[in-house]
Image (cartoon, rainbow, N blue to C red):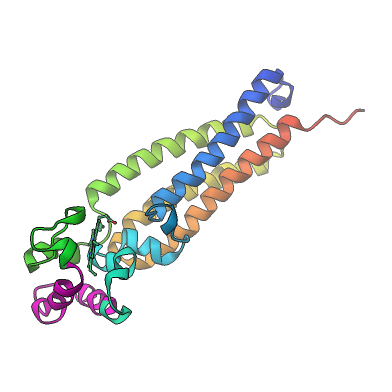
Amino acid sequence: MRATELHRAPLAARLAISGFVLVAIAGLSVCELLVNYSLHGLEHVELPGLESIRARYAYPRLKAAVLTDMGEYLDDPSEGELIARWCDEGGGRYGFYERVEPVLARRCAICHGNGATRGDVSLVTWAEVAPLSTVPGASVEELSSTTHTHLFAIGLLLLVLGGLFALTRFADWLKLALVALAYLSLAAEVGGWWLARLSEGWALLVLVAGLLLALSIATLGTLLLVDLWRLERRA
Ligand code: HEC
């Protein structure tokens, strides 16, 4: 078997590779959604977008909460904007008891006050709120763990898909371009998570790199299937 004759592999091998490609693409779509966008049960799926990426990686958790799923407990959006603005100003003690605490006491205390700590969150004193209003985005612990799993899992997937794709009949430039694009997008996506903690503008990098990564994996998989099952032209 020459280096570009993957399609001549035995039927069982081609079936196994095809099954892997299909399962990988399905699994990856779900995993991308979970990592980059917050899902709160199927009735509350947020559309992939910049705002949900900012909420996940750049905004302090209190700001993210009032702008997303906890926003429904507020009477009107201006209360959420007030809390978000206070977080943008640094989320410090200044203004907390005058502007923010009255809203929290009225709207959120049933679940986050007076001994109620749903989601392990109490929102009564500034000392309790500060870790949620002054620290940006995902915690270092959470990000380290997601980075570790994501790089390892997707890296392994790219190794298998890219390695098999290199054995197809497609042109060398296409093989190089697709494999390079996939690895570069992976690096940019994960780098973007960390940079977004420093400045929310980097959320755009996460969005673009995530889309490119998904696109390059889908293309690698599809072309691999095409090569495996495309009949050879008879001379
Ligand atoms: C009916 C109960 C209920 C009310 C009212 C409520 N929450 Fe929550 N909240 C929860 C539950 C349950 C969780 C944990 C699950 C989750 O994150 O969705 C949570 C989680 C949170 C978190 C942590 C999110 C994270 O990143 O882990 C914050 C911050 C928060 N709420 C803020 C608020 C604010 C601000 C209000 C008022 C506008 C509010 N909540 C009103 C039930 C409530």
Q: Is residue 162 above or below residue 91?
A: above
Ligand 1, seen in the image, is in the quarter at: bottom left
Write down the region rendered in magenta.
Answer: 80-108
Q: Is residue 224 rendered magenta in the image? A: no
User: Can you tell which quarter of the image residue 106 is in?
Assistant: bottom left
Looking at this view, is 120 or 133 the one in front?
120
Looking at this view, is 122 or 116 the one in front?
116
Q: Can residue 91 be seen from the camera position used here? A: no
Residue at image point 31% right, 66% down: 199
Residue at image point 54% right, 36% down: 24
The answer to whether 177 appears left or right of 75 in the picture is right
The answer to whether 175 appears left or right of 65 in the picture is right
Residue at image point 35% right, 55% down: 193
Tell me the quarter of the image containing the N terminus.
top right
Magenta residues, dominant SS class: helix
Q: Is residue 204 above or below residue 214?
A: below
Could you tell me residue 162's position as x and y percent?
57, 35
